[in-house]
Image (cartoon, rainbow, N blue to C red):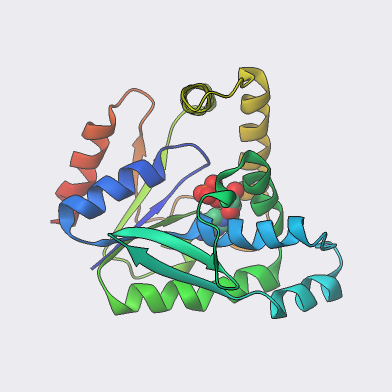
């Protein structure tokens, strides 16, 4: 059984998918983390990702592995566990840019399909229901308004002791939505057979319950 959850940045996909996976006994696969790991490499090595040759050369030097420690997904970039480093805003913004590139998407596609073929998964991302797992038994398109997503992110950063700017977060989210929805390859969109959930006025628990009711 595979459950695909797609939706824009900040819709709560990972929080919800993690809880639903726990409740259903599935493995949670965060595909955004894979794009983020490539973005981290691009940032750290100053790769000119707009230049196809430079990007392809860099990709040859990148090895991404996924492992699970006490049920939680860890991402290894060339053997280093980068699971925390990739959570920075700058890495997420770069991930959205490198994710527009065909060679980057090709590199991650097989890894994602192999994991889904090996076990029951809840996989989240942007193109899971439309492209990576078109035959997933259950597809969810999870979204929320830009304002609600920005406020959630703002509260998360505040709780971490940072001094975020709500207006900037809103702008970043709008830009990411635009990039993710308008790229040529595998853009973010609702699969025809996906269930649409707008979580703007729902609690985390309500969304998890709804998804689990489809997964059982
Ligand atoms: O879900 P996230 O914010 O960690 O994802 C970071 C970026 O990676 C996102 O803005 C677009 C890209 N991405 C993608 O193109 N396809 C996926 N399946 C997952 C993420």
* Quadrant (top left, top right, bottom left, bottom right) of the C terminus: bottom left
User: Which quadrant would residue 169 be assigned to in this image?
Assistant: top right
Could you tell me if residue 21 is visible in this image? yes
Q: Residue 106 vs residue 60: left or right?
A: left
User: Which quadrant would residue 1 be assigned to in this image?
Assistant: bottom left
Number of marks in the rendered image: 0
Q: Residue 85 vs residue 131: left or right?
A: right
How far across and how far down the image is residue 67, in percent?
40, 69
How far across and how far down the image is residue 104, in percent?
66, 69
Q: Residue at x 84, y 72 (%)?
A: 54
- Viewer-proximal residue, 105 or 164? 164
User: Which quadrant would residue 186 be assigned to in this image?
Assistant: bottom right
Could you tell me if residue 99 is visible in this image? no
Q: Residue at x 55, y 45 (%)?
A: 87
Q: Residue at x 54, y 62 (%)?
A: 34
Seen in the picture, residue 180 relative to 48 is either above or below; the reply is above
Q: Residue 132 vs residue 85: left or right?
A: left
How far across and how far down the image is residue 7, in percent?
46, 45
Seen in the picture, residue 146 relative to 137 is either above or below; the reply is above
How far across and how far down the image is residue 45, in percent?
79, 62
């Amino acid at each position: 059984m595979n459950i695909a959850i797609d939706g824009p940045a900040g819709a709560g996909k990972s929080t919800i998918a993690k809880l639903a996976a726990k409740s259903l006994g599935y493995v949670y696969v965060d595909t955004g983390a894979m794009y983020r790991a490539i973005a981290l490499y691009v940032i750290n090595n100053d790769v000119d990702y707009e230049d196809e040759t430079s990007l392809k050369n860099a990709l040859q030097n990148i090895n991404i592995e996924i492992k699970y420690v006490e049920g939680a997904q860890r991402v290894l970039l060339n053997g280093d566990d980068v699971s925390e480093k990739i959570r920075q805003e700058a890495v997420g913004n770069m991930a959205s840019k490198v994710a527009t590139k065909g060679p980057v998407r090709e590199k991650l596609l097989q890894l994602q399909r192999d994991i889904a073929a090996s076990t029951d998964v809840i996989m989240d991302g942007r193109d899971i229901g439309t492209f990576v797992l078109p035959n997933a038994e259950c597809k969810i398109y999870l979204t929320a308004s830009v304002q609600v997503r920005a406020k959630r992110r703002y509260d998360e950063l505040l709780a971490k002791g940072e001094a975020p700017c709500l207006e900037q977060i809103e702008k970043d989210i709008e830009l990411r939505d635009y990039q993710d929805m308008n790229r040529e390859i595998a853009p973010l969109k609702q699969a025809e057979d996906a269930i649409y959930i707008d979580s703007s006025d729902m609690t985390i628990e309500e969304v998890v319950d709804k998804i689990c009711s489809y997964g059982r």
